[in-house]
Amino acid sequence: MKIHKDIATFLYWLKEEQSIFLPEAWRDLPNLEDEIANLADNESSIAEAIKNWCIQRDLGEQLRDCLRKDFDDAGEPTPSTTPPLTNITQTLRTSIEDSYKKLQEIAANNQSDTSNDSN
């Protein structure tokens, strides 16, 4: 099964381009995770939920630009290096949860670094 481009782009952002998310969007990731949990691997519904979430957080243009860039840059077809996802819902939820925890750790470390600077 080929993964929907909105989902693939979002997964890439979570793993490789976390700086694209503003702090407000990061704080709202658990809500997206909950919404995805209720969609039971319905790929088109999940892609739509991601797209709407991105639009509401001023990331819709970036998502569209990434998708357009992929289309414009498409050269000769090559075999995918990404294995097909068999459980999109669980993969997304795990990725969101891992990224959210990572952000919390970074924020906690930054906060402790600044509190040490004042001593």
Image (spheres, grey):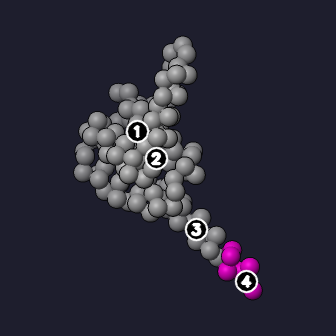
Instruction: Answer with left or right where residue 14 lies relative to residue 33.
Output: right
Query: Which numbered disc flags the more N-terminal residue, 4 or 3?
Result: 3
**Residue 98 at x, y percent in the picture:** 48, 56
Residue stretch in magenta: 113-119
**Residue 28 at x, y percent in the picture:** 40, 60
Query: Which numbered disc flags the more N-terminal residue, 2 or 3?
Result: 2
Residue at 29 percent of width and 53 percent of height: 35
Q: Residues within 10 Å of mark 3 (few under 14, many from 20)?
A: few
Q: CA distance from mark 4 to mark 3?
A: 17 Å
Q: Looking at the image, do the residues carrying marks 4 and 3 touch, with CB atoms under 8 Å apart?
A: no
Q: Looking at the image, do the residues carrying marks 1 and 4 touch, with CB atoms under 8 Å apart?
A: no
Tag 4 secondary structure? loop
Which residue is more in the foreground, 17 or 37? 17
Q: Which residue is mark 3?
A: 107
Q: CA distance from mark 1 to mark 4?
A: 43 Å
Tag 2 secondary structure? loop
Q: CA distance from mark 2 to mark 3?
A: 22 Å
Camera sees residue 30: yes
Query: Which numbered disc flags the more N-terminal residue, 1 or 4?
Result: 1
Q: Which residue is mark 4?
A: 118
Quadrant that contains the C terminus? bottom right
Q: Residues within 10 Å of mark 2 (few under 14, many from 20)?
A: some
**Residue 101 at x, y percent in the picture:** 49, 62
Magenta-colored stretch includes residue 95: no
**Residue 87 at x, y percent in the picture:** 34, 40
Q: Nearer the viewer, mark 1 or mark 4?
A: 4
Which residue is more in the foreground, 85 or 30? 30
- Name the amino acid type tagged 1: Ile
Which label number is shown at residue 7? Answer: 1
Q: Which residue is mark 2?
A: 59
Q: Residues within 10 Å of mark 1 (few under 14, many from 20)?
A: many
- Name the amino acid type tagged 3: Ala
